[in-house]
Image (cartoon, rainbow, N blue to C red):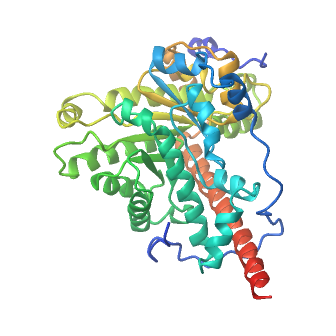
Amino acid sequence: MTGAVSKLAAPRPAAAPLPPASVRSAFVAPAPSPRRFRVSIAGRARSPIIAMASAKEGNGAPTKRTTLHDLYDLQGQSPWYDNLCRPVTDLLPLIANGVRGVTSNPSIFQKAISSSNAYDDQFKQLILAGKDAENAYWELVIKDIQDACKLFEPIYNQTDGADGYVSVEVSPRLANDTQGTVEAAKWLHKVVNRPNVYIKIPATAECVPSIKEVIANGISVNVTLIFSIARYEAVIDAYLDGLEASGLSDLSRVTSVASFFVSRVDTLIDKMLEKIGTPEALALRGKAAVAQAKLANQLYQKKFSGPRWEALVKKGAKKQRLLWASTSVKNPAYPDTLYVDPLIGPDTVSTMPDQALLAFIDHGTVSRTIDANVSDAEGVYSALEKLGIDWDGVGKQLELEGVDSFKKSFDSLLVSLEEKGNALKKTVSL
């Protein structure tokens, strides 16, 4: 094993209206799944992070500083919350504890809507007003996004549009539809109608051109499902191309983040290493994701410098910040802050689901780490290649899995909403 590889310590056990037809999927509605999601059940219990933040906030007393405040104030990294559900006001104690933005996706909304009765009244009104299931879905989602945007608007204003964003994703059924994604992004941007909304677009090969066109239209974008450095570079280029093509004299209000996924990389590559089975291969488990992320940051620094970028800066352009996504640890043998602690640096975002956010608030280390041990990361990346790991192949597989997962969540929720809507109509007609 090379010296560079051996230096990287192995992980240790932890102490609106219906969108136009061109936007909606042309797919036939999926057949009902054997596992049905009940839309209305007993009220969903508060998540642990919401309960913790509420307790810390107390009865109106000033909230004490947390590691999240330090993360932003001392290191320039914005902590975001990777979850959204009703009541949206549950975000208030999180904001008080230092959370500066929110990300959502089809799986998050599937869980929120199918496990809570908080959506029932609005859903009933929509169905009785003649809306179909997909129309109702978007109205439910748009209300949550608008309400969340309102809560984060003070942060957006305080930072002059640099932070305080809430992300909503286009239909996952459009992941391979370039123009359909553009139209969906324009529609969502119009109906949400909030300055601090990010429209999420997947970084599929078909949607990279969509990113350029949407940015060129002055719409801020969260590019999601990035799993490889090669695709990440294409995403950066799409952002720069879009800014240049916009024709805007003031680019300061067109911003973007690039969501680079982390833990899922280790999940897949660890399986490959275990299949190889040699001591060298096994010693590299749990190192691939952070190593690739550190190299992605090196590319970020390179691309957002030099004459081309400086010309855009003169027009007010802001960097497309790197956002670390998929930060929860999947392997219980790894430290629960493995995908947060080593990736801290200025002008970046870390979006964390409950597990990762709780862990970081409790025992995270606030220190600039993103550009530390880069040579070690390069060594890990090269060592994995020598073992036969195809980084681009890994990225493509994870992208396919990610898109498929979001499609399944979206489709299964629409099936359950359709069933619930039909039941409501029958009840009314009796």
Q: Hey, which quadrant is residue 81 in on the image?
A: top right
Direction from residue 203 to residue 127 in the image, left or right: right
* Percent position of residue 40, x then y: 78, 62
Of the pair 254 and 429, the residue shown nearer to us: 429
Direction from residue 27 to residue 124 in the image, left or right: right
Residue at horizontal 82 percent and vertical 58 percent from the top? 41
In the picture, the quarter occupied by the N terminus is top right
Of the pair 10 and 308, the residue shown nearer to us: 308
User: Total number of numbered labels?
Assistant: 0
In the picture, the quarter occupied by the C terminus is bottom right
- Above/below status of 32 relative to 365: below
Direction from residue 55 to residue 184 in the image, left or right: left
Determine if residue 301 is in view: yes
* Percent position of residue 425, x then y: 73, 82
* Percent position of residue 208, x then y: 40, 53
Find the residue positioned furthest to the front. Answer: 60
Of the pair 114 and 63, the residue shown nearer to us: 63
* Percent position of residue 88, x then y: 61, 46
Residue at horizontal 51 percent and vertical 37 percent from the top? 101
Q: Hey, which quadrant is residue 304 in on the image?
A: top left
Residue at horizontal 68 percent and vertical 25 percent from the top? 59
Direction from residue 369 to residue 246 in the image, left or right: left
Residue at horizontal 78 percent and vertical 49 percent from the top? 44
Of the pair 72 and 290, the residue shown nearer to us: 72
Determine if residue 371 is in view: no
